[in-house]
């Protein structure tokens, strides 16, 4: 794995939680494969960098946020 072009986003936990809850709510309400409903008991959460690219830009390399 090349580490030359890594990006680091220093995002507060409350913000990540907000995005995850919103994305999960949308996912549960959208039909899945073969039009089956998604399981609201599913514990897996994914945060798409592409979907949140605009919001993430303000957190890029914000290392000082770790000490606030």
Image (spheres, helix red, strand yellow):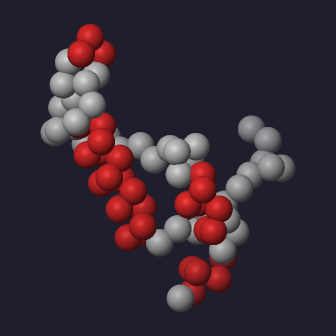
| Residue 18 x, y percent position in the rendering | 35, 62
Residue at horizontal 56%, vertical 47%? 49
| Residue 17 x, y percent position in the rendering | 35, 61
Q: Quadrant of the N terminus?
A: top right
Residue reaching furthest to the bottom: 68
Residue at horizontal 57%, vertical 86%? 67
| Residue 4 x, y percent position in the rendering | 83, 50
Residue reaching furthest to the top: 34
User: Where 9 sits versus 6, above or below?
Assistant: below
Q: Nearer the viewer, residue 18 or 63?
A: 18
- Judge from the rendering whether residue 44 lies leftward or rightward of residue 38; answer left or right: right
Count of marks, rendered view? 0
Q: Nearer the viewer, residue 48 or 29?
A: 29
| Residue 12 x, y percent position in the rendering | 47, 72
Residue at horizontal 20%, vertical 18%? 36
- Judge from the rendering whether residue 41 lies leftward or rightward of residue 19; answer left or right: left
């Amino acid at each position: 794995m090349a580490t030359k072009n890594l990006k680091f986003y220093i995002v507060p936990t409350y913000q990540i939680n907000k995005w995850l809850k919103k994305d999960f709510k949308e996912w549960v309400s959208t039909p899945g494969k073969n039009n089956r409903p998604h399981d609201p008991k599913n514990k897996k959460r994914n945060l798409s960098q592409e979907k949140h690219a605009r919001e993430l830009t303000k957190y890029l390399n914000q290392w000082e946020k770790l000490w606030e």
